[in-house]
Amino acid sequence: MKYTIFSDTHLSKYFDEKKYNFLKKIISNSETIIINGDFWEAYNFKFDEFILSSWKKLFKDLKNKKTIYLFGNHDKKIYANNKLSEFSVRQFQNIKIISGSKTFYIEHGDKITPLWDKFFRRMPKFINIFLNNLEKMIVFLFGINVLKILYKRFNEDMKNKKSRILKDNEYLVCGHTHFMEIDKKNHYINGGFIKHGIGQYLTITDGKVELHNEKY
C-alpha cells in the first residue's frame, strides 16, 4: 500500500490553478491519501463556501482514493459539517497506520505545539491574509531554507514532547509547522506544506518514507 500524506495547503477563496494542477497530479499518482490538516482556510473562508468553490474539482479524485482527512487548527471539526464526505471517506483527529515493520502515528501537530492558534482565530481576516503574503514574500526573496530559521524550533518542541515515548519501530508524522523534516534519531517526520509555489509531501510504501519537495 502506498500512502501519500500532505498537509497545510490552506486552500482559500482565491483559486490557484497551478496549485490545483499540482494537487491533482499527486492525488492521481497515489493509492491512498491522508490529508494531515489545514486543508482549507477557515480563518477567512467558510466551509460551505469552500465546498462550492472551484476547489471542488478535486473532490471526486480525493474520494476515489478513499481519502482520510485529519483536522488541523485552521480547519477544525467544529468549522465543518457532514459535507466532509464529499471529499473524504473517514475523518479523525489522528490515525495510526502500519506499513512494513513500522507504525506511524499521524496527526496535524497543533495539539502538541499550539503555536498562535488563539491569536489567529481572534484577529481580523486581513491580518491573516497579510501574514500569509508576508510568508510568501520571505520565501520568494530568501528561498525555502529560510523556514528553518522561522519554524525549526516548533519541530524541536514536538520532538521533545513526543520522541521519548516512541518505540524503535514507531514514528510521529506531523504537519502544522510548515517545515519539512525527517529526523530518524527522534522518530519524527514533518511533511511540510503546499503553498507559495512549493509542493511538499511525503509517501510511505512498505515502511519506506520519502519526502518530496517540488515547485509548481
Image (cartoon, rainbow, N blue to C red):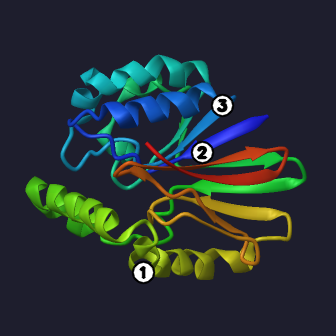
Image position of 103 with respect to 87: above or below: below
Amino acid type at circle 2 is Ile
Nearest to the eye among marks 2 and 1: give it.
1
Q: Position of residue 202 (x, y in %)?
A: 63, 49
| Residue at 72 percent of width and 80 percent of height | 164
Quadrant location of the C terminus?
top left
Q: Earlier in the sequence, mark 3 or mark 1?
A: 3
Rendered image: mark on residue 5: 2
Q: In the rendered image, which residue does mark 3 sit on?
A: 30
Quadrant location of the N terminus?
top right
Rendered image: mark on residue 215: none
Q: Nearer the viewer, residue 202 or 196?
A: 196
Q: Earlier in the sequence, mark 2 or mark 3?
A: 2
- What is the secondary structure assignment of the residue under circle 1? helix
Q: Position of residue 196 (x, y in %)?
A: 34, 52
Q: Position of residue 95 (x, y in %)?
A: 64, 48
